[in-house]
Image (spheres, rainbow, N blue to C red):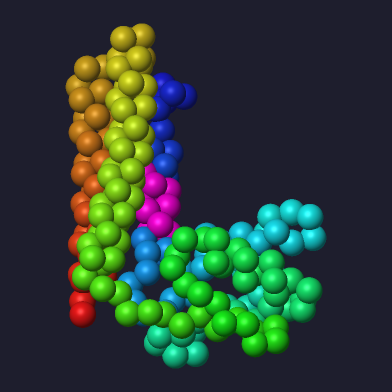
Amino acid sequence: MATEDFDIDDLKRRMEGSTTSFKSDLGGLRTGRASATLLDPITVEAYGQQMPLNQVATVNVPEPRLISVQVWDKSMVPAVEKAIRNSNIGLSPVVDGTNLRLPMPELNEERRRELVKVGHQYAENARVAVRHVRRDGMEALKKLEKDKELGQDDARAESDKVQKLTDEAITEIDALLAQKETEIMQV
């Protein structure tokens, strides 16, 4: 069986990449509880380039409703504060020397519903990415079958494996979404 165009392990890795990316997106959704991962997507203009926040400061969660950002270079404090304010995560930093405190406000019902909608959008994007990987695998199988490098029975067996991987990835995405939705809607 010639498999230069078809590698089930590569398809699995790409689907897992979509799921991992989705987990990261969900980590950025604010649930009312403080989480250091909430600041992961934030980049800071530092030393003439964009740098992730965690490369210019230490992020801690000393209390359930407070994030603490300890900036290493005092001259970077205004840039870090600006980056957090402009990030659209809805947090207002309180500057105390080189330390920024980010109190987590209570989420109202309307904001919770908006966050759930954002979570659903992230999930749909992840499902689409998984389906694109599935499509690539199916097209590679059809080409191998058409070029007589793979028999019809083998192609069908491989396509069943691809579909099984797709179903597993989408089931995992749905489970992660349901878990995050429950977390967001808890009062």
94 to the left or right of 3: right
Nearer the observer, 111 or 187: 111
Q: Quadrant of residue 154?
A: top left
134 to the left or right of 102: left
User: Quarter of the image containing the N terminus?
Assistant: top left
Which x, y percent locates residue 163?
22, 36
Report the magenta residues as a range: 15-25
Please identify the residue farthest to the top as the structure is shown: 147
Dominant secondary structure (helix, strand or loop) of the stretch shown in magenta: helix
* Relative height, residue 162 to residue 54 (above, below): above
Picture residue at 74% right of the left edge, 54% below the top = 49
Which x, y percent locates residue 18?
39, 47
Nearer the observer, 47 or 5: 47
Nearer the observer, 173 or 124: 124
Q: Quadrant of residue 58?
A: bottom right
Nearer the observer, 129 or 97: 97
Picture residue at 47% right of the left edge, 61% below the top = 88
- The number of discs equals 0
Picture residue at 24% right of the left edge, 47% below the top = 170
Q: Quadrant of residue 3?
A: top left
User: Quarter of the image containing the C terminus?
Assistant: bottom left
145 to the left or right of 28: left
* Relative height, residue 60 to residue 16 (above, below): below
* Relative height, residue 173 to residue 108 (above, below): above
Can residue 24 be seen at all in this image of the molecule? yes
Residue 130 within the segment the image draws in magenta: no
